[in-house]
Amino acid sequence: MDVWEVFSRRTADDPLVHVGAVKAPDLELALVLARETFFRHGEGVDCWVGRRGDLHRVAQPETLGGVTDKSYRRADGYVGVGAKLKRVRDALAARGLTVDGERPDGKR
Amino acid sequence: MTYEERTAEFKARIDAGEKVEATDWMPDSYRQAALKFIEMHANSEIMGALPEREWIPRAPTLRRKLSLTAKVQDEVGHAQILYRIAEDLGKSREAMFDDLVNGRTKFHNVFHYPTKSWGDIAVIGWLIDGAALVTQHALLGCSYAPYVRAMRRICAEESLHLRHGEDMTLELCSGTDAQREMFQDAVNRWWRPIMHFFGPPSNPEKDVLLYWGIKTRSNEDLRQEFFTTYVPKLWDLGITVPDPALRFEESTGEWEWGDPGWDDFWQVVKGNGPMTQTRLTWRKAMWDSHAWMRDVFAGIRRVA
């Protein structure tokens, strides 16, 4: 008997998320069991199953995203940009370089 | 049920805010509109990598070089995701590439211009990515669910690019007079293409993309949001906007803006932009020189 991995979509535009597995002799029963096991309370709007043997894991998942410093690819490589904007803005205002003009309310 | 009845039922689903999956029945008109739009987006991502790529060897520091390389990788990655989604709507990737490199389909107008200085890279990273983010955020409400899921990921990555662009901008604007002039010069050259980016003001009643909920906001609506977000920031940095007619009109709560030369826009749309042929030729050369790799992949499929 095969193990079938079960995937759910919580709302219509969500991605599929793995929610668990069922054991079933064929696809038809796998779908029935997935439905009854994981969706009784309306947990999702869509359900997919796939044979565990048809799904494959990447080798060395700990190397995903690289093993050297790749912070330039991530948000944490750019913390402080907001504060820098304020600093630069204030410095330029102090030098009288700001351009005057009517601005929408509440926006700066 | 007749085709017309099914179509009416489908339209009612869209109007009720329901999402469409690749496996759902859809009218031809919806499929064609969604395909054309997503294909154009994919084309723009893969062509949009080129203007910035030209500056990777000339980046001023190693850190900037790494960031710019990562960004170019992201754009190409977005194209891969989007072409896959477009393929599910019924056109093969091979056909889409063939149409792109032979000038039969379009890519976004801002990618038809040369990048003349490092200031251009700051403008692309901040203002053009900013304009793109305004339009892309509006697509999170799209009726085609696979596209929405892709856009969530793409918007997250674009936000990062925007941070990088803002950082480059601040570096230049707080730098020497020459650096500030370099940035101002880049803004002066790119402002019109950015206005073109949002498209001419159009009649929302006649927009098939709005009709099917593929787009949710009009060109002008998005342009106004861009002004409100970026014009005051530019002014704060002491940068002038090269449109003498641009002003915020308090009584209407809208920005007024001047003619950005729509003739130039239509020339670019027709494939006559300053860099259109150069970049398409380069892309075609890559497509042709990598044909062997597609053959290898096809061979693996046959053997397996």
Image (cartoon, coloured by chain):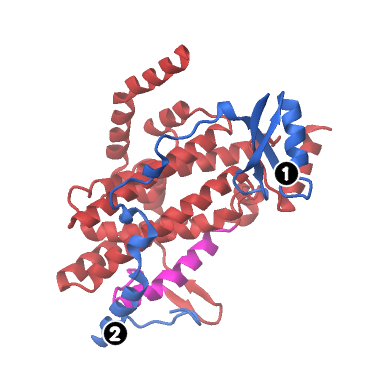
Chain colours: A blue, B red
The quarter holding residue A23 reads top right
Mark nearest the camera among 1 and 2 is: 1
Instruction: Using residue B58 as the reference point, say whether residue B226 is left or right of it.
Output: right
Residue B183, image x and y in percent? 24, 66
Q: Identify the magenta region.
A: B217-246
Up the image or down, B188 lies above or below B146; here it is below
| Mark 1–mark 2 distance (CA, rounded to whole Å) | 59 Å
Residue B23, image x and y in percent? 66, 34
- Element on which disc 2 rests: helix
- Element on which disc 1 rests: helix
Q: Judge whether residue B106 can be spotted in this image.
A: no
Q: Which residue is mark 1?
A: A38
Q: Residue at x 65, y 26 (%)?
A: A2
SS majority, magenta? helix
Most distant residue in the right direction: B1
**Count of number-bearing discs:** 2
Residue B254, image x and y in percent? 52, 74
Quadrant occupied by the N terminus of chain B: top right
Instruction: Using residue B140 as the reference point, say whether residue B96 is left or right of it.
Output: left
Instruction: Using residue B60 as the reference point, say whether residue A73 is left or right of it.
Output: right
The quarter holding residue A91 reads bottom left
Q: Are marks 1 and 2 in contact (CB under 8 Å)?
A: no
Q: Residue at x 79, y 43 (%)?
A: B9
Q: Amino acid at mark 1?
A: Phe
Q: Which residue is mark 2?
A: A93
The quarter holding residue B262 reads bottom left
Most distant residue in the top direction: B303
Host chain of mark 1: A
Could you classify mark 2 by the number of other residues whose Cα lies within 10 Å: few (under 14), some (14-19), or many (20 or more)?
Answer: some
Could you classify mark 1 by the number of other residues whose Cα lies within 10 Å: few (under 14), some (14-19), or many (20 or more)?
Answer: some
Same chain for labels 1 and 2? Say yes or no: yes
Host chain of mark 2: A
